[in-house]
Amino acid sequence: MESEQDPDIQLLPRGTFMCRLCEVNVPNRASLEDHKKGKKHQKLCSIRETRKVQEEHSLFVSGFQHGTSELEITDHFQRFGPVSSIIMDKNQGVYAFVEYGSIESLQSALAEPEHIMNGKRLKVKPREKKEFKYTPKKKQAPSNSLLPSLELLSPVLCQANDVDEQMEKLVQLFGFSESEERLRELVISLIQEVFSEFFPECKIIPFGSTVNGFNIHCCDLDLFLDLEHTKIFQAKSKGSNEQTGVIEDTQSEDSILSDIDLETASEAEVLELVAMVLRKCVPGVHKVQAVTTARRPVVKFIHKDSGLHGDISVNNRLAVRNTSFLKLCSALDKRLRPLVYAVRYWAKQKHLAGQSSGRGPTLNNYALTLLVIFFLQNREIPVIPSVNHLKELAGEGDQCIIEGWDCSFPSDASTLPPSKNCESLCTLLSEFFNFYGQFDFVSSVICLRDRKALPVTAFLSNKEGKSPRLGPVNILDPFELCHNVAANLNERSEQRFRKQCLEAAKYCRSLQYQRKSAKGKVWGLVRLFNEDSVSAEGSPGVPGEVSQERMVIDIPFKLASLSEETRKKLCNSDDFRQLWFGWVSAAVLSVLEDMLKCTCCITPAALQYSTTAEHCAKLEAGEDPHTQLPELSTRVADHNEPSDEVLDGKNPPEVNSNESDTTASMAGESLNSSKRHRCSDGGASSCKKLRFEPENMAGNASWYCTLWHKVWAGRRKMRRDILRGLKASRTDENDDDNDGGGIDLEARVSEAIAQQERASGNTSEPVLNFTLHLEVVGGTESTRTLAVITPVQDASGLFQDFFHFLQLFLPKMTEKLLEKKIK
């Protein structure tokens, strides 16, 4: 029995197993062996063995005086042998575990008839052996201590007269008080005074939330140490010393500048000096840490008396300039600050910003602020001008070039004409959610410099080092145009952000948002901020029924998965969505025909609906658009033609009237005959395969498909069996298609399932007939292909199971085909 051989393993009914150590179930013996070789199981075995050794070498000691130190206990027990460690009860201080390096030392201590320490008789016995049970450390929940809780905000906000007043109150509640501003000024003055002694003529310049106009309680203190004048001072001192031979203070043994040449020193070396000065010379500063591997290296510290967390950088002039830009924007229009505060708090409450909390990467406050500014730039009457327009208005004294980037803009907001936009804060916030709920993030790059969304393909051919890191959300820094401030986000984060924006926009159209409650109920921003006020998941459907919404499968546009060659094809194309949709359509067809062994025919133009919404509307109305199928026409090619050419759109076949007649008869046979030959039943010559030109797709495509086998039933087990056989016979270790998600492997799995069904005698009737309608969506929504699956003939009631399988399988295999065939 397995359980007799390994006490960690328990045999369960139906041949499954449970690992008691890891507390997980595994379906079969092969999976059990893989689990036992896994990292988690091996780690727990190692921890258990270590704990066992510790227990065997440890004593339990009690009876000593409260407050006894570890050193006193060590001094007493090391008479019997070397003591490895002492574990004290820190809460009560009434017992301890003494661990020896050897069993002999333990036995000697136990053999002592009486232990007396500080006049107290100790109780000494072997440490109790307990059954091992691993309890991982719980991750601390993210803290929202920087912002007041919604419970504290609710009474104050609900007393306001309208949403505009609520948003103004947010600024008052979140922003610095006079005492906080004064405290930060004092800390900055203290650091400036100390650093001036070691780095003559240096400047400590605050930037970020402290001074950009969007401060909140207890935000970090970001400081820039400007050493340009110090470098000049050091160079002059060296030149003077060489001429006069006099050793000045900067070259004395006591000067920090005698140890380093600021002009040639690396950033890491300078930061280490900064950290040393903070540790040894600035009063009240502790927990100093130099972080030299970050994108912008800094020295972190905490000022003990004020509780401020801060950091100092020495090469961050762009951040200082960005701070001045945000300060100018907030001065240009007084509506910007309330909007930013409201959006930031909403994003925090919805777990879209701040610390992750296990829901994926999130936006930072800087990215959210840029989103608000970009939205205001794109109102019908702009609230804030573009960065390029501000550059044109800059005077001679405002010209600024940093690291090759033009950072020019006026320094005085009063010299600029005010915006003629008169929209209320209530309206602007509602329109913000509507704007980004329908924004095409995936295929666009947000550019505040031009105040417009640029096509992502325009950035694919940029030279190395000048191209931003592109992702599902692309927000260019206003000046450093190679920096995407939202590059950390993934597809899930982008989808969650858009979905929450749509839900918020829907709520903002209700009276609960726009009007104060006469019955004392929460309203306006309070309901908007409530985490459970709007659900992004949708209402559950009727059990056993597939709703029309769930019959749509998303295949998103993923720039990261495209090869360099494909990027060149997309770069600056007239309509990259159209080109990409053609490739996706070809890949989807290949998944159905090659991997799942379906028979597919192109439906006539009458069935190719102009929009997916119209298609779903017909279905919801109870209409069956496929009950009367007119004569079908399509082009076909031999089954043996390479699928690479299909995906690449090469060698388009010629079509003649005879071929069309043949195709029509084949299509009619597939619809009306259950005896149709399938690829698995005969040779290649007996089967025809659909063929079309991907690059000439018209934005939508529809197919009538027949599924002949239950390709989802037992698929995982069949794949595992085939993989086991492949591993036994495989000679090429670099065969990528033999992995668990390989393209050729999936075709083999479907064929094996078909053979298994034929062996059982189930070969006469198709499993189900369905239509597949593909349509590319973009422009007002994130670019993606929507696949609408509709059952036509499902006598066995298997469509729901097939669709749930297809929801995961189709996007995954389509992406693999695009990667493999286009590269």
Image: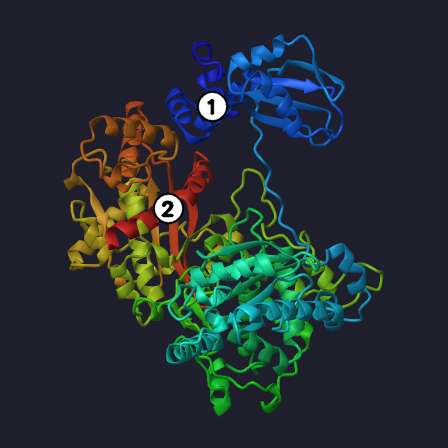
Q: Amino acid at mark 1?
A: Cys
Measure how far apart labels 1 and 2 are at the Cα level: 35 Å
Q: Residues within 10 Å of mark 1 (few under 14, many from 20)?
A: some
Which residue is painted at 43% across and 11% down in the image?
5
Left or right, residue 739 beside residue 413: left
Q: Secondary structure at mark 1?
A: helix
- Looking at this view, name the residue that lies furthest to the front: 245
Quick check: 170 above or below 587?
below
User: Where residue 483 sits in the image (x, y, percent)?
Assistant: 43, 67
Residue sitting at x 52%, y 12%? 104
Cβ atoms at labels 1 and 2 below 8 Å apart: no
Q: Mark 2: which amino acid?
A: Lys
User: Considering depth in this image, is 482 or 267 the residue closer to the camera?
Assistant: 267
Q: Is residue 122 above or below residue 427?
A: above
Figure colour scheme:
rainbow
Which residue position holds label 2? 812
Tell me the quarter of the image containing the C terminus.
Answer: bottom left
Q: Is residue 571 left or right of residue 452?
A: left
Work out which quarter of the rendered image holds the N terminus and state it.
top left
Percent from the top left, x then y, of residue 275?
53, 58
| Residue 483: numbered disc | none
Quadrant housing residue 524: bottom right
Residue 609 visible at all: no
Is 429 on the left or on the right of 781, as rendered? right
**Is tag 1's residue or tag 2's residue first in the polypeptide sequence?**
1
Q: In the drawing, what numbered circle is on residue 45?
A: 1
Asked if one can make out residue 708 in the rendered structure from this viewpoint, the answer is yes
